[in-house]
Amino acid sequence: MSLPKIPLAGVIGSPIAHSKSPQLHGHWLKTYDIAGHYIPLHVEPADLENVVRQMPKMGFVGANVTIPHKEAVMAIADQITDRATLMGAANTLIFRPDGKIMADNTDGYGFINNLKEGAPDWQPASGPAVVLGAGGACRAVIAALIEAGVEDIILTNRTRDRAEQLRSDFGQKVRVVDWVQAPNVLEEGKLVVNTTSLGMAGKSRLRIPLDGLRPDAVVTDLIYTPLETDLLKYADSVGCTTVDGLGMLIHQAVPGFERWFGTRPEVTEETRAAILA
């Protein structure tokens, strides 16, 4: 009698040693007593296609994808979900039994579910959302906000051209202002989202005046190293509701884990503790 195959999944990136995903998925595998493994995979760009095409033959049922491969895997996939197409990037691969590779993007799902969990009183119709930055993560945030029902998104980025491109892609619900105007538009924001890397450990600080933040605003930062950024510290000090970035990492992982291992994991305090351990 042949033994059942042990399902494998992992996260592909370069570098990848910093990733918290193995701790997260390992916690869920242990919690739900699933005979599977999730491993970090350092893959250089030149090797990406060859590695991804070989993975199903090695027992992999899927993988997460992170920097710098999130756009490149789109060209390798046989099928691409609508939300991955909209974002122009994928963070989740599913290796189907028929051999097809499906690419999905769950970043927007992770962002909006983290926001709802951390700020349950926030309403999409409550007022404008101010979004700082126009990089890859920003596309997922804007798409999720529009889908949730936000009518007015104020976007600002150090390079205005990138912000204008997003406005062109997403339409009139997005209005672009110059980076030097960021302190002024904070006064309008009922929701403020930092999608830049400014404030992350090892990166430059977010050097914009924050005194325009409204005490009734919700402020969230996609950064989770450190867990409490200077932006969140200041926002908390003036009475804002703050939401850290760790929950986005956790929530975006839920759909992939469910597809790969057949169990939908719950996001609990124990989940956060397992990542922070």
Image: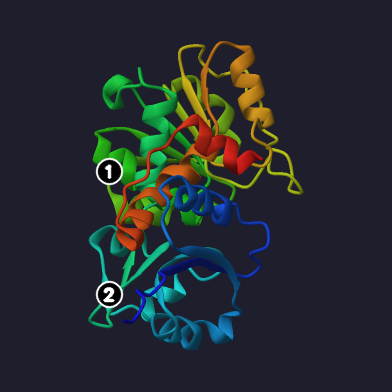
Task: Identify which amino acid the numbered label 2 is placed on.
Answer: Arg
The answer to whether residue 74 is visible is: yes
Residue 186: x and y in percent read: 51, 25
What amino acid is at disc 1? Answer: Gln
- Indicate which disc residue 96 carries: 2
Q: Position of residue 253 (x, y in %)?
A: 42, 51
Check disc 2 and report its element: helix, strand or loop.
Answer: loop
Q: How many marks?
A: 2
Q: Residues within 10 Å of mark 1 (few under 14, many from 20)?
A: few
Asked whether residue 221 appears in the rendered view, the answer is no
Compare residues 68 and 257 and report the one nearer the observer: 257
Q: Earlier in the sequence, mark 2 or mark 1?
A: 2
Which image quarter is the N terminus in?
Answer: bottom left
Label 2 crowd (10 A; few <14 / some 14-19 / many >=20)? some
Q: Which residue is mark 1?
A: 172
- Taking the spot 45% from the left edge, 75% from the top edge, the residue there is 72
Residue 246 placement: quadrant? top right
Give coordinates of residue 275: x percent, y percent. 59, 43
Q: Disc 2 to disc 1, how far (Cα)?
A: 38 Å
Closer to us: mark 2 or mark 1?
A: 2
Report the front residue among 104 and 155: 104
